[in-house]
Amino acid sequence: MDSLILEPSLYTVKAVLILDNDGDRLYAKYYDDTYPTVKEQKAFEKNIFNKTHRTDSEIALLEGLTVVYKSNIDLFFYVIGSSHENEVRCSGIVGEYGGTFPGCG
């Protein structure tokens, strides 16, 4: 029996974030209620930024979520999925969207 390969969709993505070089929100779109209030969202964004802005890695597991990210000098682009999502699937989305932003992709 062939294994089923699902195409990435916004249903597999929990959030898309773009933060500046201080970790402040430039754009945020949450696709579920994991962080229902703006206060919780901004706290989550600061936590992600603090743990990723000085690393060379592009994948992290934070707060039970898969975080795939790219950065430029002053732009941080994040795609967040659940911990059981395949990081390759999320990184494909980062690559797809990252190319639309100067310096990413």
Image: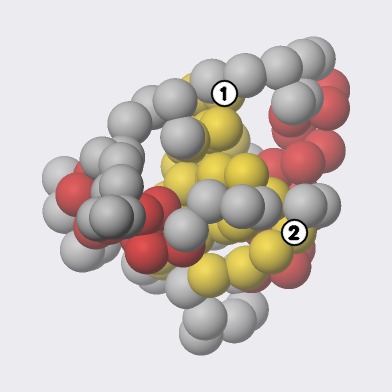
**Of marks 2 and 1, which one's residue comes earlier in the chain?**
1
Residue at disc 1, secondary structure: strand
Q: Where is residue 51 in the image (x, y as percent from the top left)?
A: 73, 68
Q: Is residue 100 left or right of residue 48?
A: left
Quadrant in the rendering for residue 71: bottom left
Look at the image and tell me whether residue 101 can be seen.
no
Residue visible at 44% across and 25% down? 11
Q: Please tell me how crowded label 1 is: few (under 14), some (14-19), or many (20+) other residues with Cα within 10 Å.
A: some
Residue reaching furthest to the bottom: 56
Q: Position of residue 23 (x, y in %)?
A: 64, 50
Disc assigned to residue 30? 1
Quadrant in the rendering for residue 82: top right
Residue visible at 76% across and 25% down? 35
Residue in front for this viewpoint, 39 or 58: 58
Residue at disc 2, secondary structure: strand
Residue visible at 62% across and 68% down? 60
Question: In which quadrant of the rendered image does the C terminus lie?
Answer: bottom left
Above or below, 2 against 4 in this view is: below
Q: In this view, does 95 lie to the left or right of 10?
A: left
Disc assigned to residue 62? 2
Q: Which amino acid does label 1 sit on?
A: Tyr
Q: Is residue 34 left or right of residue 53?
A: right
